[in-house]
Image (cartoon, rainbow, N blue to C red):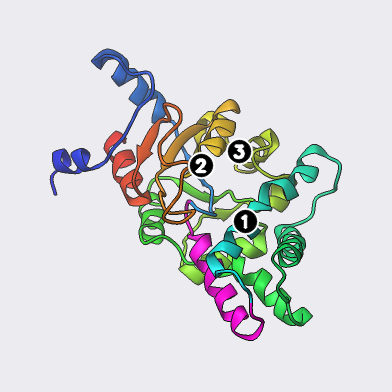
Amino acid sequence: MTRKKRWARVRVSISTVSNQKKSKATLKAKSNCSALLFDVFGTVVDWRSGVARDLKAHFRTYPCAYEPELVADAWRAEYQSSMEPVRNGSRGYVDLDILHSENLETVAKKLDFDLGTREQKNWLVKAWHRLPCWPDSALGIEQLKEQFICASQSNGHIALAVNLAKYNQFSWDVILGSEVVRTYKPAPEAYTRACDALGLRPEECMMVAAHNSDLSAARAQGLQTAFIRRPTEHGPNQSIDLEPSDNWEFTVESITELSAALDDLR
């Protein structure tokens, strides 16, 4: 495939570019990017299908009146609110396994299903450690590693991120688990401390995410941004994050397309 055709295939938006002279200046400014910080849940892995898969297996022994996908959605719906006490300082840092466990208990009570034994409940909590990736994720990360530091910058803790990497063969250069930043995105410290951990300035790092709120918070701290469209993260009737909400430096359909776009700028 020629450079021209590849460029045509990649949908890239470079913010605030109105003429050729300004475009060259913008491209030069973006060339200082040294590291890509990846959101994981929804951006790199398909959490909904993975969680629903394990819930379906659980419901064979412990029946539930609701479809596994609906229960997965309900479990995920507790995600942000459960992290807020850690973000605002009213609760000390706890890792995502603890929050997922507490949230699962909440959902089981609301939807009236049995979690089974302690071992069975823990197995369900660990569903978040064995989520399948999107088809482009592993290859895209491998391609990007040739020119950039590729880091997992998830709200997941290190053990969770390592298990996801092993499960999907992600070749991260570094895993910046929530233990490193001691808070949860979109708290400002989640981004600045990640950059500090790499010894880089925020403008030398790019946040890669399928969520506009994540990118907005990252940009507020000086990071560059890349929006990956994941229109089925929340299932076939998804209504959020279908389009970029701002002029992110890049808007692409996949991680492999981001690799192609960045390659054209080097």
10 Å crowding of disc 2: few (<14), some (14-19), many (20+): many
Left or right: residue 43 versus residue 115 is: left
Residue drawn at (71%, 80%) of the image: 120
Q: Do labels 1 and 2 touch, CB within 8 Å?
A: no
Q: Do labels 3 and 1 touch, CB within 8 Å?
A: no
Prevailing secondary structure of the magenta residues: helix
Left or right: residue 18 versus residue 55 is: left
Residue drawn at (39%, 45%) of the image: 229
Quarter of image, res 30: top left
Q: Amino acid at mark 1?
A: Arg
User: Which residue position is annotated with label 1?
Assistant: 76
- Determine whether the residue tagged by mark 3 lies in a helix, strand or loop: helix
Left or right: residue 205 versus residue 93 is: left
Between circles 3 and 1, the one closer to the viewer is 1
User: Which residue position is annotated with label 3?
Assistant: 195
Residue drawn at (47%, 38%) of the image: 34
**Mark with earlier residue (1, 2):** 1
Q: Which residues are magenta?
A: 43-63
Q: Nearer the viewer, residue 185 or 111?
A: 111
Residue 82, image x and y in percent? Answer: 74, 50
Which residue is at the far bottom?
A: 61
Residue drawn at (76%, 66%) of the image: 109
Residue 95, image x and y in percent? Answer: 74, 57
Alpha carbons under labels 3 and 1: distance apart: 27 Å
Q: Nearer the viewer, residue 139 or 8?
A: 8
**Mark with earlier residue (3, 1):** 1
User: Which residue position is annotated with label 2?
Assistant: 211
Quarter of the picture holding the C terminus: top left
- Does the stretch in magenta take in 55? yes
Between circles 3 and 2, the one closer to the viewer is 2
Q: Is residue 201 visible to us here?
A: no
